[in-house]
Amino acid sequence: MATKATTKKATGTKTAAKSTSKTTAKKTTSRKKKVSEADIRKKAEEIYNKRILKGTPGSAESDWLEAEKLLHK
């Protein structure tokens, strides 16, 4: 059985090779750190101290809520 030999001529132009691999979208899951009551208490105390230094009105409850808001982002 005879086989045909194939030859390709160089044309001087470059061709881009097609990528055969499929790209898959990676699922990015952000794991939120569980915020403890001690973490919130510490942050609320920082907010309180800054608020007192500035002379800004507020309350312990508003400081606590602000701390929760900031830590749960």
Image (cartoon, rainbow, N blue to C red):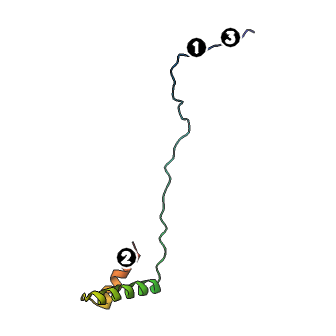
Which circle's residue, 1 or 2, is located before the other in the chain? 1
* Numbered label tally: 3
Label 2: few (<14), some (14–19) or many (≥20) C-alpha neighbours in 10 Å? few
Point 38% across, 85% down: residue: 46
Label 1: few (<14), some (14–19) or many (≥20) C-alpha neighbours in 10 Å? few
Q: Quadrant of the C terminus?
A: bottom left
* Amino acid found under the numbered disc labelled 3: Lys
Point 33% across, 81% down: residue: 66
Q: Position of residue 7 (x, y in %)?
A: 63, 13
* Amino acid found under the numbered disc labelled 1: Lys
Q: Is residue 19 above or below residue 47?
A: above
**Residue beneath label 1, please?**
9
Q: Nearer the viewer, residue 73 or 52?
A: 52
Q: Position of residue 58 (x, y in %)?
A: 26, 88
Point 32% across, 89% down: residue: 61
As measured in the structure, the alpha-carbon distance from the residue carrying label 1 to the one carrying label 2 is 67 Å
Q: Quadrant of the N terminus?
A: top right
Q: Position of residue 29 (x, y in %)?
A: 48, 62
Task: Indicate the secondary structure of the residue bearing disc 3.
Answer: loop
**Residue beneath label 2, please?**
70
Q: Position of residue 22 (x, y in %)?
A: 53, 41
Between circles 3 and 1, the one closer to the viewer is 1
Which circle's residue, 3 or 2, is located before the other in the chain? 3
Q: Residue 60's quadrant in the figure?
A: bottom left
As measured in the structure, the alpha-carbon distance from the residue carrying label 3 to the one carrying label 2 is 73 Å
The reply to whether dot 3 and dot 1 touch (C-beta < 8 Å) is: no
Q: Residue furthest right?
A: 1
* Amino acid found under the numbered disc labelled 2: Leu
**Residue beneath label 3, please?**
4
Which circle's residue, 3 or 1, is located before the other in the chain? 3
Task: Indicate the secondary structure of the residue bearing disc 1.
Answer: loop
